[in-house]
Image (spheres, helix red, strand yellow):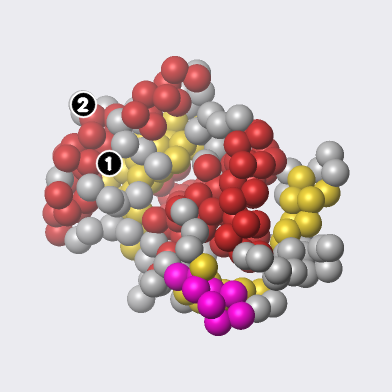
């Protein structure tokens, strides 16, 4: 079944553009022109993700966002706010109101599709692959379990997301900033050296006492998952 996305936007050309691109990317799309209609549609069928415009007639996108978050059936539904506002304070207000991500107008449709996919992946791992493997490491995404050479490995949530990101892009070198964006989210402020702390934990958990180190540190560049590490 195609993932169902609800667009809440009063500007018809933007709805048309988003609808076209999301449908091309194999999403099922519905749209609402204001918050009231959106809440009605959500009541009829729960979307897997909501693209919500900030500037809506009568009830603002922020208020709609809060209302969606208050309902028990949509508390966890991913929301991406669309808006022309780009001030830092607005971004923070948007995220505070419960949005998962934030896209500033004007945007490229390709960017929107990519962000929709990324937010869905983060919130519903079962939508993508069930398991990924690299060398002797296996991640069961549905069960949230990791093993190496058949032995279970216990990871904290951040290490789990970090490892997953590496496993999805084996061999690629990522800077600390890229890892922060991908794993922590681009609107969260975390110091780059936090990445080092989590890499250290991930290494320790993955390598145990004597296993081969799978994470390569690239001086002044970042990190990669790379079996040729050592
Ligand atoms: Ca609007």
Disc 2/disc 1 C-alpha distance (Å): 11 Å
Left or right of 108 on screen, residue 221: right
Residue shown at 76% from the left, 45% from the top: 222
| Rendering quarter of residue 59 | top left
Give the residue at mark 2. 58
Mark 2–mark 1 CB contact (< 8 Å): no
Q: Is residue 125 magenta?
A: no
Q: Quadrant of the N terminus?
A: bottom left
In this orientation, which residue lies closer to the viewer: 32 or 134? 134
Residue shown at 47% from the left, 54% from the top: 156
Please state the extent of the stretch shown in magenta in the rendering: 145-152
Of the residues under marks 2 and 1, which one precedes in the sequence?
1
Left or right of 171 on screen, residue 80: left
In this orientation, which residue lies closer to the viewer: 223 or 178? 223
Left or right of 53 on screen, residue 201: right
Helix, strand or loop status at disc 1: loop
Image location (x, y in percent) of residue 21: 51, 57
Q: Residue furthest bottom?
A: 150
Callout 1 environment at 10 Å: few (<14), some (14 to 19), or many (20+)? some
Specify the principal SS of the magenta part: strand
- Residue 91 drawn above or below residue 175: above
Can I make out residue 100 in this image? yes
Helix, strand or loop status at disc 2: loop
Give the residue at mark 1. 33
Left or right of 202 on screen, residue 223: right
């Amino acid at each position: 079944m195609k993932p169902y996305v609800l667009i809440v936007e009063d500007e018809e050309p933007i709805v048309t553009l988003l609808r076209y691109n999301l449908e091309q990317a194999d999403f099922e799309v519905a749209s609402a022109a204001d918050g009231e209609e959106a809440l009605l549609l959500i009541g009829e069928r729960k979307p897997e993700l909501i693209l919500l415009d900030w500037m809506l007639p009568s009830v603002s996108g922020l208020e709609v966002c809060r209302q969606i978050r208050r309902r028990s059936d949509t508390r966890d539904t991913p929301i991406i706010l669309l808006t022309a506002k780009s001030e830092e304070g607005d971004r923070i207000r948007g995220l505070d109101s419960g949005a998962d991500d934030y896209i500033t107008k004007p945007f490229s449709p390709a960017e929107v599709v990519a962000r929709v996919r990324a937010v869905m992946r983060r919130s519903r791992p079962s939508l993508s692959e069930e398991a990924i493997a690299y060398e002797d490491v296996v991640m069961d995404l549905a069960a949230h379990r990791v093993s190496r050479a058949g032995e279970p490995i216990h990871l904290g949530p951040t290490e789990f997301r970090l490892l997953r990101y590496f496993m999805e892009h084996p061999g690629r070198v990522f800077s600390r900033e890229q890892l922060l964006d991908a794993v922590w989210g681009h609107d969260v402020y975390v110091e780059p050296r936090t990445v080092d702390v989590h890499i250290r934990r991930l290494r320790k958990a993955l390598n145990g006492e004597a296993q081969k180190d799978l994470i390569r540190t690239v001086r002044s560049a970042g990190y990669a998952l790379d079996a040729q590490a050592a």
